[in-house]
Amino acid sequence: MNDQEYAGFWVRTGAAIIDTILMLIIVAPILTATYGTGYWVRESFVQGVWDVLLNYILPAIAVIIFWVHKSATPGKMAMKLTIVDAKTGGKPSTGQFVGRYLGYYVSMIPLFLGVIWVGIDKRKQGWHDKLSGTVVIKSNLIEPVKFESQV
């Protein structure tokens, strides 16, 4: 653990921006083709089934698939970050990844406080990390490092 560095708020924000741009490049043309250019200026929250599928279901599935297979999203990979189990330093379980994704909603509800928590916490864990038992580390080291449990 001495050689491993936790990924802080700004590098993780950069990774999230990369992921958002990539998802927008995929989803925006499909939404525009489906609903027209008026989609982007309408006031209603949900435009239809494709809106829900492309804005909520597809991103959730894509993120969880990347986490399960790569322990990172494309943005995290670009920033050389990896999600690991907080206790063992190994790969988290699929259940932890699903819980981590759902934990994002918990982290965002109170004015994004759970996400901002990454900048405050000693281990750089957001609430979604704490709920799922994960940490995000800089993955530039060759050897995997085992973490000790904190009480």
Image: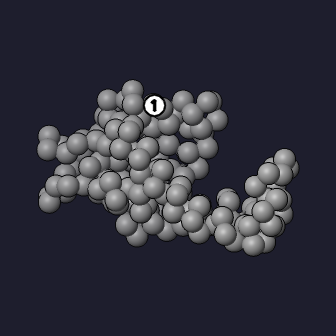
Residue where numbered disc 1 is placed: 117
Q: Of residues 143 and 38, which is closer to you in this image?
A: 38
| Identity of the residue drawn at 24% across and 55% down | 139
In the displayed structure, 6 sits above or below 39; it is: above
Q: Position of residue 88 (x, y in %)?
A: 28, 51
Q: Of residues 113 and 23, which is closer to you in this image?
A: 23
The image's colour scheme reads: one colour
The residue at the far top in this view is: 120
Taking the image as drawn, is residue 93 in sight? no
Location of the C terminus (image quadrant): top left
From the viewer's perspective, tell me whether residue 42 is left or right of residue 98. right
Q: Position of residue 18 (x, y in %)?
A: 45, 55
Report crowding for label 1: few under 14, some 14 to 19, many 20 or more residues within 10 A (C-alpha).
some
Q: How many marks?
A: 1
Q: Quadrant of residue 75?
A: bottom left
- The amino acid type of the residue labelled 1 equals Trp
The residue at the far front in this view is: 37
Location of the N terminus (image quadrant): top left
In the displayed structure, 113 sits above or below 131; it is: above
| Identity of the residue drawn at 14% across and 44% down | 3
Q: Position of residue 104 (x, y in %)?
A: 56, 45
From the viewer's perspective, tell me whether residue 83 is left or right of residue 45. left
| Identity of the residue drawn at 32% across and 43% down | 7
Q: Position of residue 84 (x, y in %)?
A: 33, 53
| Identity of the residue drawn at 81% across and 55% down | 46
Q: Secondary structure at mark 1?
A: helix
Taking the image as drawn, is residue 116 in sight? yes
From the viewer's perspective, tell me whether residue 107 is left or right of residue 82. right
